[in-house]
Structure formats: structure tokens, C-alpha cells
Amino acid sequence: MEFKEFEGKNIEEAKQKAMRTIGISEEEQLDFEVIDEGKLNMFGLGTSRPAKIKARFKDTSYSSEPSSDNQTQNELSKAAENILKDLFSLMDLDAGLAAIEETDSRLYIDLTSPSDAGLIIGGKGKTLESLQFLVNLLVNRKVDDNSKKIVLNIESYREKREESLKNLSLDVAAKVISSGRPQALDPMNPFERRLVHLTLQNENRIKTESEGEGEYRQVVVKPV
């Protein structure tokens, strides 16, 4: 796996973001190098310069023998590719696959579309999330013993969404500290809620709690 760059408020947050993106749960599985340790601003909210690392999945397999997992991986990638092509054709979308990358627990697929990218993403990424759910459902019916999650992305939408949510979280935290009143963010999926919690976890003047049920569950930022 090629090195990719990740940023965070500090090195630990950058590593956590890399682990979530790559799809690993243990830091020992992460091969990383520190590019910039970053610098906090004088108020402790956000950064005047983000910490930056480059990271990749640490390959600990040294066997040259082909494993049975390779067959499953090829089957998974092919099934996902065929299903997406069929869905794009049925929906009359001008879209295709730009790249496929696989880790131990994830299959990352970058989509490309000259004219329909906005339609595929939808409002706040809901169409992309629905398409991802549908692809995972259909692939699981075709591939036996598939424990990997398929993650769809297009035009770096997920990276841009993460950066937008981090900035929004910091803005809301500043308003809560200033006003002394709690403020609720819009409902989000579990991954986005976790990102908000992680972004604000080191700010001791506020606390974050998830409230509500199902698709209406949202993060509430409260003063301490």
C-alpha cells in the first residue's frame, strides 16, 4: 500500500484518522512517518498549523505462497466492480471506477464521473451512503465469507467532508464556550459523530454527547 498523508490537531489525531481511513484497529499495524508535529493556536481551539504524517498499512506477511484470501479478494473486487457498473447503467449515470484499493478489513473504491458526481454524492453525502449500503448488501450476497466493508468515494468527497466537519465542530465549540449554552449539530451517521467527538475530545471547557435515535441521532456540544 502506498503512503498517504493525514492531518490532525496533533500526531495522535492524525494517526487515528489514518487508522480509520486505512481500516485497521491496532496502531502496530500502521507504518507512519511524522512530517510536521503541528502547532496549537493560543486559544487551544483548532490549530495554527496541523500535525501531518504519512502512513500506510504495515505489511507483515512474508509468505510467497498464494493464499486462499487472494481468491476471495479478487472475487470481492470483481463482484463490486460488476455491481457498480450494472447500477450505473440502470440509473443512466455517466460514472465509472477510477481505482480499487484493498486492506485487511476494507475495500476502497474511488468513483469517477465527468458530469454526475454531484448527483452521486447527494445532499450531505446521503446518496453516496445509500449507494455504498446497497453495494455492500449485493456483494455480500455474491461473495461467501466476506467480512470486508466496501467504502465508496468520489472526487475526494470523504476527505473534504471530514475537513468540513472538523471546522464546523471547532466553530460550534467556540460558540458554546462563548455563550455558555449547548448547541446541537445536524444528525449524522456514526462515523461522522465519532469524528466530532475526536475533534473536540481535548477541549476541557466543553463536552460532547450523542443524543436521539437512528438517523436522527446527533452530537450535542455542551459547556462544562
Image (cartoon, rainbow, N blue to C red):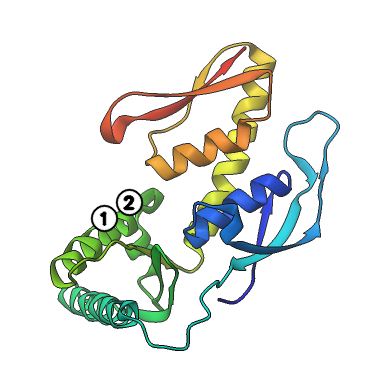
Q: Position of residue 93 (x, y in %)?
A: 26, 75
Question: In the picture provided, is 129 more to the left or to the right than 183?
Answer: left
Q: Position of residue 88 (x, y in %)?
A: 23, 75
Q: Position of residue 148 (x, y in %)?
A: 32, 63
- Of residues 126 and 12, the one drawn nearer to the viewer in this rendering: 12
Please say if 196 is above or below 24. above
Q: Residue at x 64, y 22 (%)?
A: 175
Q: Residues within 10 Å of mark 2 (few under 14, many from 20)?
A: few
Could you tell me which secondary element the residue under label 2 belongs to? helix
Per the image, the residue denoted by label 2 is 126
Q: Are marks 1 and 2 in contact (CB under 8 Å)?
A: yes
Label 2 sits on what residue type? Lys
Could you tell me which secondary element the residue under label 1 belongs to? helix
Per the image, the residue denoted by label 1 is 130
Q: CA distance from mark 1 to mark 2?
A: 6 Å
Q: Residue at x 58, y 35 (%)?
A: 169
Quadrant of the snapshot with the C terminus: top right
Question: In the picture provided, is 39 more to the left or to the right than 26?
Answer: right
